[in-house]
Amino acid sequence: MFPENIGKRLSIDKTSLSNGELFTIITNKAAIGKKGAIVAMVAGTTAETVIAIIEKIPLKQRNLVTEITLDMARNIGLIAKKSWVNHKSWGGIKYSRYLRQKIGLGKLYRTT
Protein backbone atom coordinates (compact mmCIF):
# COMPACT_ATOMS: atom_id res chain seq x y z
CA MET A 1 0.00 0.00 0.00
CA PHE A 2 1.26 3.45 -0.98
CA PRO A 3 -1.17 6.04 0.42
CA GLU A 4 1.19 8.83 -0.64
CA ASN A 5 0.25 7.98 -4.24
CA ILE A 6 -3.43 8.91 -3.80
CA GLY A 7 -4.62 11.56 -6.21
CA LYS A 8 -7.90 13.08 -7.32
CA ARG A 9 -8.57 10.40 -9.95
CA LEU A 10 -8.28 6.70 -9.10
CA SER A 11 -8.94 3.48 -10.93
CA ILE A 12 -9.89 0.14 -9.36
CA ASP A 13 -9.57 -3.13 -11.22
CA LYS A 14 -8.93 -6.79 -10.61
CA THR A 15 -6.24 -8.86 -12.26
CA SER A 16 -4.62 -12.28 -12.17
CA LEU A 17 -0.85 -12.23 -11.94
CA SER A 18 -0.03 -15.95 -11.84
CA ASN A 19 -1.60 -19.33 -11.11
CA GLY A 20 -5.07 -17.82 -10.97
CA GLU A 21 -4.28 -15.64 -7.94
CA LEU A 22 -6.57 -12.62 -8.08
CA PHE A 23 -5.52 -9.16 -6.96
CA THR A 24 -7.33 -5.86 -6.67
CA ILE A 25 -5.24 -2.93 -7.86
CA ILE A 26 -5.98 0.70 -7.07
CA THR A 27 -4.04 3.18 -9.17
CA ASN A 28 -3.64 6.93 -9.48
CA LYS A 29 -4.70 7.80 -13.02
CA ALA A 30 -2.53 10.94 -13.08
CA ALA A 31 0.62 8.79 -12.93
CA ILE A 32 -0.36 7.11 -16.24
CA GLY A 33 1.17 3.77 -15.26
CA LYS A 34 4.52 5.23 -14.24
CA LYS A 35 6.20 5.75 -10.88
CA GLY A 36 3.67 6.60 -8.20
CA ALA A 37 0.77 4.91 -9.98
CA ILE A 38 0.03 2.14 -7.47
CA VAL A 39 -1.98 3.21 -4.43
CA ALA A 40 -2.72 -0.33 -3.24
CA MET A 41 -2.41 -3.89 -4.47
CA VAL A 42 -4.51 -6.30 -2.43
CA ALA A 43 -4.42 -10.10 -2.62
CA GLY A 44 -8.00 -11.12 -3.32
CA THR A 45 -11.06 -9.42 -4.73
CA THR A 46 -13.64 -9.75 -1.98
CA ALA A 47 -15.05 -6.41 -0.93
CA GLU A 48 -14.43 -7.06 2.78
CA THR A 49 -10.73 -7.82 2.25
CA VAL A 50 -10.07 -4.80 0.06
CA ILE A 51 -12.12 -2.39 2.19
CA ALA A 52 -10.18 -3.45 5.30
CA ILE A 53 -6.91 -2.52 3.56
CA ILE A 54 -8.20 0.76 2.11
CA GLU A 55 -9.53 1.84 5.51
CA LYS A 56 -5.92 1.87 6.74
CA ILE A 57 -5.41 4.92 4.51
CA PRO A 58 -6.30 8.03 6.54
CA LEU A 59 -9.72 9.48 5.74
CA LYS A 60 -8.12 12.86 5.05
CA GLN A 61 -6.19 11.32 2.15
CA ARG A 62 -9.17 9.32 0.89
CA ASN A 63 -11.22 12.53 0.83
CA LEU A 64 -8.85 13.95 -1.80
CA VAL A 65 -10.43 11.64 -4.38
CA THR A 66 -12.93 13.22 -6.78
CA GLU A 67 -13.29 10.42 -9.35
CA ILE A 68 -13.06 6.63 -9.30
CA THR A 69 -13.16 4.58 -12.49
CA LEU A 70 -14.06 0.92 -12.08
CA ASP A 71 -15.45 -2.07 -13.90
CA MET A 72 -19.02 -3.18 -13.34
CA ALA A 73 -18.32 -6.03 -10.93
CA ARG A 74 -20.52 -5.70 -7.85
CA ASN A 75 -17.66 -6.20 -5.42
CA ILE A 76 -15.61 -3.43 -7.03
CA GLY A 77 -18.58 -1.04 -6.86
CA LEU A 78 -19.10 -1.92 -3.21
CA ILE A 79 -15.42 -1.26 -2.49
CA ALA A 80 -15.70 2.21 -4.02
CA LYS A 81 -18.92 3.08 -2.19
CA LYS A 82 -17.75 1.87 1.23
CA SER A 83 -14.17 3.17 1.06
CA TRP A 84 -14.96 6.62 -0.29
CA VAL A 85 -18.04 7.54 1.69
CA ASN A 86 -18.21 11.07 0.27
CA HIS A 87 -18.70 9.75 -3.29
CA LYS A 88 -22.29 11.03 -3.35
CA SER A 89 -21.16 14.61 -2.83
CA TRP A 90 -18.92 14.58 -5.90
CA GLY A 91 -20.70 12.00 -8.05
CA GLY A 92 -17.38 10.56 -9.03
CA ILE A 93 -17.90 6.82 -9.41
CA LYS A 94 -17.60 6.14 -13.12
CA TYR A 95 -17.82 2.83 -14.87
CA SER A 96 -15.17 1.91 -17.38
CA ARG A 97 -15.96 3.22 -20.87
CA TYR A 98 -14.70 -0.05 -22.37
CA LEU A 99 -17.23 -2.07 -20.39
CA ARG A 100 -20.08 0.31 -21.20
CA GLN A 101 -19.23 0.01 -24.91
CA LYS A 102 -19.00 -3.78 -24.68
CA ILE A 103 -22.42 -4.02 -23.03
CA GLY A 104 -23.94 -1.57 -25.50
CA LEU A 105 -22.57 -3.46 -28.49
CA GLY A 106 -23.80 -6.74 -27.03
CA LYS A 107 -27.32 -5.32 -26.78
CA LEU A 108 -27.09 -3.91 -30.30
CA TYR A 109 -26.10 -7.28 -31.78
CA ARG A 110 -28.88 -9.08 -29.91
CA THR A 111 -31.55 -6.74 -31.27
CA THR A 112 -30.53 -7.04 -34.92
Image (cartoon, rainbow, N blue to C red):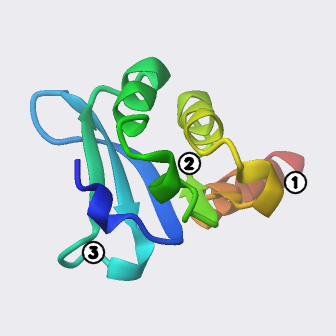
Could you tell whether 71 is left or right of 1 in the image?
right
Marks 3 and 2 close (CB-CB < 8 Å): no
Q: CA distance from mark 3 to mark 1?
A: 39 Å
Return the residue at label 3: 33
Task: Give the residue displayed 42% in from the left and 48% down from the top.
Answer: 13
Q: CA distance from mark 3 to mark 2?
A: 18 Å
- Amino acid at circle 1: Thr
Task: Give the residue displayed 35% in from the left and 36% down from the top.
Answer: 56
Task: Give the residue displayed 73% in from the left and 58% down from the top.
Answer: 105
Q: Position of residue 88 (x, y in %)?
A: 80, 50
Could you tell whether 90 is left or right of 1 in the image?
right
Q: Nearer the viewer, mark 3 or mark 2?
A: 3
Q: Nearer the viewer, mark 1 or mark 2?
A: 2
Task: Give the residue displayed 23% in from the left and 55% down from the top.
Answer: 2
SS class, disc 1: loop
Could you tell whether 4 is left or right of 60 in the image?
left
- Amino acid at circle 2: Asp
Marks 3 and 1 close (CB-CB < 8 Å): no
Asked which quadrant contains residue 80, the reply is top right
Return the residue at label 2: 71
Return the residue at label 1: 112
Observer-nearest of 97 and 54: 54
Marks 1 and 2 close (CB-CB < 8 Å): no
- Amino acid at circle 3: Gly
Q: Position of residue 112 (x, y in %)?
A: 87, 54
Q: Nearer the viewer, mark 3 or mark 1?
A: 3
Near mark 1 (Cα within 10 A), the count class, few <14, some 14-19 or many ≥20, is: few
The disc, 1 or 2, on the residue closer to the chain's N-terminal end is: 2
